[in-house]
Image: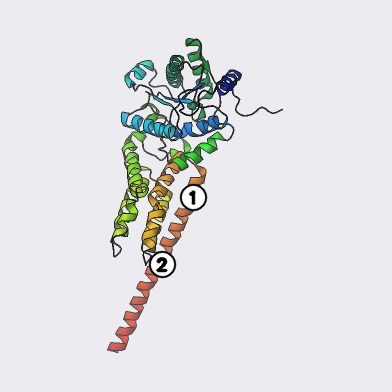
């Protein structure tokens, strides 16, 4: 008989069964038989969904002092907290002590990705996780680090086992969280939650490493963190608070023109930060469509402006493209081709009209002066 992709430890099953029989751990999310170390919201999302579907209500522990710079850390932390709160789960904020982490990996700064520095980083973070589990009276702990295809599962397992050996009374649940369709589900939830999706592992040393295939043309993430954070705030303001629709109510097409100007921010990011022609054209597709729909008469365009949410669509394209989401990349390429075709058609139409004007001018001049 084929074993399931994800196997719950027998001890954890026994704990959950006992808690259920006693009526514990329900409702407020404060009681849990599992401490889940979360590296970020996107990596946590599918894992947490699977745990809840299988009767395990985890406590989320966000401990990632490796993340650099501090602004990047705050963005990732807030997304993790937002995700946990949306599910009513208990979320714990670990300390951000980047200096302590630097001391922990001292001498390993020049190690490549997946080298001994990464192993030491995992050991440190999971050791603190095991100590937190002991403090909370939680026996089992696991980590969302094992959901990333860019990290070594062997290193993560070794780090978890090391932490377990250092903190008696705790057990590390070594699990490949990419299996069982969770990696694909992660990408779906990333779009559904509109998560911020980082472009590098976290530490300053990973910035200089070889990027993944989907991000080879991207600049270093430290240079774009502020831009992405600003665009997210703009997206929430324009679409989630319906400011785009309100601006669109200005008469004579003025509101639609102003709303279209905000799209320049996404276009600039795609063209000059990510440097992708296809993504730039796809965002231009959304912007032009938003403007044209807004120009529909009899207030039809104004009503559509409230529900079209082009800024959210632009942010999803950017996130999915950066993450290498195949579905989003196909959509980006499709919209890019559409926009290119329309631009070529418009160019040919303009050339034809100019030729016709010249031809008419010549004919008229010949008729008048012959």
Question: Circle 2 is placed at which residue position?
Answer: 348
User: Closest to the observer: 196 or 81?
Assistant: 81
Element at label 2: helix
Q: In which quarter of the image is residue 73?
A: top left
In the displayed structure, 357 sits above or below 101; it is: below
In the rendering, which numbered label is found on residue 282? none
Q: In which quarter of the image is residue 257?
A: bottom left
Q: Is residue 27 left or right of residue 356?
A: right
User: Closest to the observer: 281 or 261?
Assistant: 261
Mark 1 or 2: the one toward you = 1
Can you give x and y, in whole percent of width and height, for residue 190 in the image? 46, 39
Please report the residue visible at 33 percent of the width from the left and 76 percent of the height from the top: 358
In the displayed structure, 360 sits above or below 154; it is: below
**N-terminal-most mark, 1 or 2:** 1
In the displayed structure, 364 sits above or below 31; it is: below
Name the residue at the front extreme: 22
Please report the residue visible at 32 percent of the width from the left and 48 percent of the height from the top: 265
Q: In which quarter of the image is the N terminus?
A: top right
Circle 1/circle 2 CB separation < 8 Å: no
Element at label 1: helix
Name the residue at the right extreme: 1
Compute the Cα span from label 1 to label 2.
26 Å
Can you give x and y, in whole percent of width and height, for residue 74 in the image? 34, 31
Q: Quadrant of the C terminus?
A: bottom left
User: Closest to the observer: 161 or 133?
Assistant: 133
Question: Circle 1 is placed at which residue position?
Answer: 331
Please report the residue visible at 47 percent of the width from the left and 10 percent of the height from the top: 166
């Amino acid at each position: 008989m084929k074993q399931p992709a994800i196997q719950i430890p027998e001890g954890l099953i026994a704990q959950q069964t006992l808690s259920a029989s006693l009526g514990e751990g329900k409702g407020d999310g404060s009681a849990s038989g599992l401490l889940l170390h979360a590296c970020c919201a996107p990596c946590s999302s599918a894992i947490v969904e699977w745990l809840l579907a299988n009767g395990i209500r985890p406590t989320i522990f966000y401990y990632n002092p490796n993340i650099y710079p501090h602004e990047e850390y705050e963005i990732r932390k807030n997304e993790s907290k937002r995700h946990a709160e949306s599910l009513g789960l208990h979320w714990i904020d670990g300390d951000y002590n980047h200096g302590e982490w630097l001391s922990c990996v001292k001498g390993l700064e020049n190690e490549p990705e997946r080298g001994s520095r990464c192993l030491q980083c995992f050991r440190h973070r999971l050791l603190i996780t095991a100590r937190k589990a002991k403090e909370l009276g939680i026996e089992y702990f696991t980590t969302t680090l094992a959901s990333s295809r860019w990290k070594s599962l062997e290193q993560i397992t070794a780090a978890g086992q090391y932490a377990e050996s250092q903190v008696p009374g705790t057990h590390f649940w070594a699990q490949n969280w990419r299996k069982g369709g969770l990696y694909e589900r992660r990408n779906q939830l990333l779009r559904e939650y509109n998560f911020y999706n980082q472009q590098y592992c976290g530490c300053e040393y990973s910035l200089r490493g070889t990027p993944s295939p989907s991000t080879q043309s991207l600049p270093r993430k430290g240079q774009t963190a502020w831009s992405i954070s600003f665009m997210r705030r703009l997206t929430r303001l324009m679409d989630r608070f319906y400011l785009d629709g309100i601006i669109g109510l200005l008469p004579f097409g003025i509101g639609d023109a102003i709303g279209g100007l905000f799209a320049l921010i996404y276009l600039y990011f795609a063209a000059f930060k990510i440097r992708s022609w296809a993504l730039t054209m796809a965002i231009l597709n959304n912007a032009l469509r938003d403007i044209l729909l807004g120009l529909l008469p009899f207030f039809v365009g104004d009503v559509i402006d409230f529900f079209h949410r082009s800024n959210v669509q632009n942010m999803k394209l950017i996130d999915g493209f950066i993450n290498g989401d195949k579905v989003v990349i196909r959509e980006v390429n499709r919209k890019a081709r559409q926009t290119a075709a329309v631009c070529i058609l418009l160019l040919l139409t303009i050339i034809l009209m100019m030729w016709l004007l010249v031809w008419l001018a010549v004919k008229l001049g010949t008729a008048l002066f012959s």
